[in-house]
Image: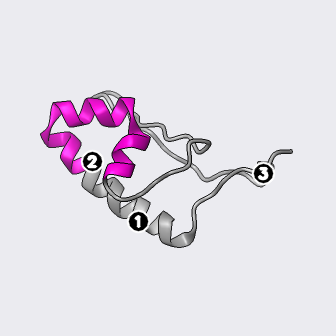
Amino acid sequence: MTEQTSLSQEELDLFDELCDKLIELAAEDPDFRATLIEKPHKVFAEHGLEIPKDLKIKVLEEKSDEFYLVIPVGDDE
């Protein structure tokens, strides 16, 4: 089993704060929205949080007839 990179609690807190800000920016600016979807690591870095490349960031765009429920990682991972 390979050891996976993780973020510190401070980085996780910053991630949460940035998510709210980035969602607002994406709602206002279609070009920013497209960049966030295509290059999330770049966008987070530009806003002060370097996320290691081996940590995946999935940016999902909800549709009017969809909702997403994100659940925490299970004990088996």
Q: Could you tell me the amino acid type at mark 2?
A: Ile
The dot on residue 23 is 2
Looking at the image, is mark 3 or mark 2 nearer the viewer? 3
Label 1 sits on a secondary structure element that is: helix
N-terminal-most mark, 3 or 1: 3
The residue lying furthest to the right in this view is 1
Quadrant of residue 47 in the image?
A: bottom left
Q: Position of residue 13 (x, y in %)?
A: 45, 68
Query: Which residue is painted at 14% across and 37% down in the image?
Result: 29
Question: What segment is highlighted magenta in the picture?
Answer: 23-46
Distance, label 3 to label 1, CA atoms, is 23 Å
Q: What is the quadrant of the N terminus in the image?
A: top right
34 to the left or right of 51: left
Mark positioned earlier in the residue sequence (1 or 2) = 1
**Label at residue 3:** 3
Q: Tell which of 43 and 17 is nearer to you.
A: 43
Q: Looking at the picture, how far across and down is residue 75, in whole percent? A: 77, 55
Q: Which quadrant of the view contains residue 36?
A: top left
The residue that disc 1 covers is: 14
Dot 3 or dot 2, earlier in sequence? 3
